[in-house]
Every structure is written in C-alpha cells, then in structure tokens.
Image: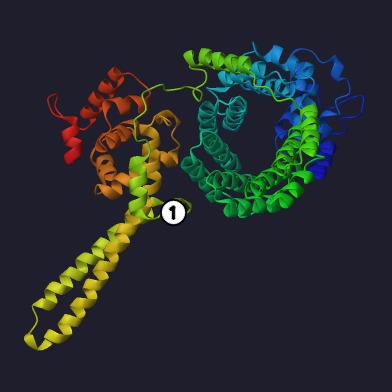
Amino acid sequence: MNKYLFFIFLFIGGGFVSCKQTNSDVELLEQVERYVEVYPDSAMQLLNLLQYPEKLHGKERADYALLLTQILDKNYLDSLQSDSLIKIAVDYYKGSGDNVKAGKSYYYWGKTLVVKGKLSEAMEAFLEALAFLKETTEYKLLGLLSEHIGYLNLGQGMSEQSIGNYRQSIYYYELAGDKIGEIYGCRNVARGYLAEQNNDSARWYVNKGLSLLPDTTTQVKSSLLHVLGLIAKSEKRYSQAIDFFVSAIRSNINTNDGLRYYLSLGYTYMDIGKFALAEKCFRHCMGAKDVFISSGAYNYLYLLKKEECSYKEALLYKEKSDSILEVVSNDKLRNQLLALQKKYEAEKLIMENRQIKLEKENQTYLYLFIVLCISGLGFCVIKKYKKKNIRNIEALRKNEKTIEEYLYKIARLEQKEESEQEAKKETIGKLNRKILDLTLENKKIRNSSSVEALFVLEELKQGRLVAERMTASERQSIFDFLDLVYANFIFRIKTDFDVTKGELLLAALIKLDFSTKQLMIVFDCEVKSIYKSKQRLKSHLRLNKDDSLEQMIAFY
C-alpha cells in the first residue's frame, strides 16, 4: 500500500525529480510531514526527491533535519548514532515559538543521547520536551516522553519515580486513544512495582494490560507473561513461573526479548535443581548480539557451574562475563538525575516525577486485603471488570423491582381462601427461592464491582495516585462504587445539584470518610485549598454557612 501511495504522490506532483519543479521545497516538506507518522517508508522516498537539501536555510533546514531523523528512526535505520542532524532542529525550534516541533526535536535529541550513554543529558532533553509540549494536545508524544523518562529512572534503580512516569504515560495514551500504548504502560508500571517487591500491585497491572489486549496477538503479550513469570518465581511458585516463561517464548516475535525470557527460564530451572535444562537455556543465549544478554548468560553459567562444584569451568565463564560487560553502579549519575528532576518539579514542568513525602500508614494493604478475602473473587475478577458498571446498576434495579413484584404476589396469595393453601405454600416457596437467588446475585454484583474502586481508593490513600493523574475510568469506578453501595449517591447529587467533576470527587471522598490529611494528598494541595474547595461545595449543595458539609453528605 505504501508503494502505491508513493507513486500516486509522484504522479500528482507532476515529476518532482525534474529540474523545473512544479512544487516548492516547502510544499514537499509539508507533504512528508503529513505522512511521516503513517507511512515512514513512503515519506523517505518523498524526502529523497529533494534535490539540494544542503542549500536549505532557516526553517526549511530545521524541518528537513527533524523529518529525516524521524524517518530514519521509524524505519529502524540507526538514525540516532549521531546527534549533529537533530541538533540543527533543536537549535532552531527552541526559540521559534513552535512548541510542538521544539518538543519533537528535544525528544529525538534525548533518544540520541541515550544511545550515546549520556543519560543525565538525555533526561534533561526529555524534560525540556515536556516543558514545550505540556500545553499541547500531542498526547501520544507526551506518553512516549513519560515512558522514556520512566526507563531512565528504573535503569538507575529509582523504581518509585518510574512508576509515576509510567502512570502518566497511561494517562496520555488514553487521551490519545492509543490502546497498545496503554497496555505497554500497564506492563511498565507492573515492572516498577515488581522492582519494589510489591507483587500484588504488579499482578493487578499485568492483568489490566492483558484485559486490554486486542484479539490479534501482539508483542506486548509475551512481555506481560514474562512479568507474571517473574512474580510467580519471586513467590516460589516455580511450576507456574516456568509455564509463563514458556508461553512468553512461544508468543514472542522479538529475538532479543525472546533471549531474555530464556535467561529467566534457565534461572528458574537452576533454582529447582534442573541444571541440565538451565544450562541448555543459558547456552542458547551465549551468542546474543546484545551484550547485556550474552554477559548475563555467561554469568548464569558461572553460577550454575559453581553449584555443580565445577570450579574451573565456573572461573572461565566468570572471566568471559566480565570481559563482555563490566557492570558498575553509578551513584553520581543517579544523584544528577534526581537533582535535575527536583529542579523541574519546582517549576511544575514535570508532574509525573513528584514525590509526596508523607508519613506512610502502618498497615498499607490491610483494608484491601480484607475486602478481597471477603469477596472471594481475587484478581481474576478484574479481567471481567471490562463490562460497564452501569449494567450492574441496571441489573440491581431490575432485580429489586422483581423482588417487589414477588413480594406483592406473596401478599395477594396470602389473602386467598383456605382451599388454596397447599398450592399457595408451593408458590410462595418458589417465589422465596427466587428472591434469595436475586439477593445473592445482587451481592455478587456489588462485590465484583467493588474490586477496581477499592484498589484505586487505596492508591489515593497511600499517595501513589493523585486526582490530577487519575484516568477517566479510575474516577468513574469510584463513582459507580458509591452508586452501588450508597443507593445511587452520585447519581442523586448530579441530578439534584449543579456540581463540577472535581466537586463530585470531593463529595465522594468525604462520603468515604477521607480525612483532611488524606484529601491534601489526593488533591496535592495545602489545607487552605481543601477548606476553600469544601466551602464552594457547600455553596453548590445550597447549604448555609453554619451547616455541616460532612453531616449533610453522610445522611444524603
């Protein structure tokens, strides 16, 4: 399709290759810009039609540099080995007033610096890109930026910061309508939680990512299965871990990723004493082009041979691993990245790396754990939570209406003559059984509909999620939960009063007994702001100055 599109452009253009061009260089660059995201191969052919790129100046020269970098990167042609090309675009656009192109230029410059190993400078470039793009609607690019910053943080052992970055990427991908991006974001958050040894949260995000997968097989599925394998391995569920790693290998289409899965599988075999199978996996990775993978394979072979007391072989593998790659912790670089992010936090240029340093409560997951135990559904329910909660609410209302009808029939039957007593008892028994079944069904619906809302509420209480970063689905899950538990509380407030979305969330959290301290965490503000927000909510709920907002919401 790309080739046909190219020749159509060529025909319409009337022959770009002629010396007397019918379209200007500017028009050609504009055409390339329109198609670089969708058809990068055809865009490259179009850009090659520009006869004298070295004669371009000013904006056209910067456009050419940015477009060529984009095209080479999207066609996987190692465009990021040299930063001289993209630096032309960076130098021009940073003071041009075109925030979108300035942000794109800094983004690709940051990627170039990552390839060169200049991670601190790369972080600075990514943050500059965020500063330019924060007021734009370039949501997919904002998602990519948040994702790359998360990679840098996780690579330096700052998993808590990376989780915030990946959450922000999910938010932007959702705004962009990029479902695959959302799935990768869930995978990345899960990896961050796994680094924090928070297996429950990691598993929750993996299951959420799997629930968003399209019908067709995608590469991200194998990486999600790999994370589930790592979780199972850390919990010493070795049989399940092996199954997950094997499934990840079978569904994988990327060579490097597949080799990483082999390393994990081999290490699991080694943990359970199956050294022959482990060695087979490690040897499969010895010739990897990726130095990290090949070095890891030799290092695992060193550990394996040491377990087998083959010390001579173990020493040879250790020397080989060290000669391929010397892994050194870089505390200086880590401090540079933290200092740089704190500088931008103060200027409100990056929201995803902020740390809310508040005192942690002692029993973090106790409430959530109790509710999950009572419900008996566990995390498997989350995959089924894709159905709209509104259906659950309608089902509840329908069942309650049917219960009323059955009760009415019972009352009618009880008034009949004595001769109908036996038939009446049988009918009453059937109706009572139906009432019991519907009541149990309502209980199940309430339990299943509560899982995601309770998880989100716990994240809010612990300061790992703030209102500004909540997705639309996370906010709606809380509203639906309140409608189920408190007799359509949200629906009634929206119907009876004119309140904003922020005020609706504040009312919901007050209904759930969030303290002022917890509200300060959720809305990321001082106590004065919470007081003012409550006063505005009182006004919209038509309360007098002396009326109690908390009491009104509690009994509403």
- Left or right of 87, for residue 45: right
State the image quarter where residue 139 is shown.
Answer: top right
Q: Does the rendering let one see residue 29?
A: no
The single residue placed furthest to the right in the displayed view is 19
Q: Could you say whether the residue bearing mark 1 is in a helix, strand or loop? A: helix
- Left or right of 96, for residue 159: left
Location of residue 353 with respect to 347 vertically, above or below:
below
Q: Name the amino acid type tagged 1.
A: Val
State the image quarter where residue 43 is shown.
Answer: top right
Residue to which mark 1 is pinned: 381
Q: Return the x and y of residue 61 as percentages of the image width and height.
A: 78, 17
Q: Is 489 or 268 nearer to us in this picture? A: 268
Badge 1 crowding class, 10 Å Cα cut-off, few under 14, some 14 to 19, many 20 or more, is: some
| Picture mark count | 1
Q: Return the x and y of residue 347 as percentages of the image width and height.
A: 49, 13
Q: Does the rendering let one see residue 383?
A: yes
Q: Residue at x 44, y 42 (%)?
A: 473
Q: Residue at x 29, y 50 (%)?
A: 484
Location of residue 133 with respect to 480 vertically, above or below:
above
The single residue placed furthest to the bottom in the displayed view is 419
Q: Quadrant where the C terminus lies?
A: top left
Q: Return the x and y of residue 58 as percentages of the image width and height.
A: 75, 12
Q: Residue at x 70, y 18 (%)?
A: 118
Q: Is 345 or 370 nearer to us in this picture? A: 370
State the image quarter where residue 290 is shown.
Answer: top right
Location of residue 277 with respect to 107 vertically, above or below:
below
Q: Is 217 or 276 nearer to us in this picture? A: 276
Q: Return the x and y of residue 253 as percentages of the image width and height.
A: 73, 48
Q: Residue at x 19, y 30 (%)?
A: 549
- Left or right of 452, for residue 417: left
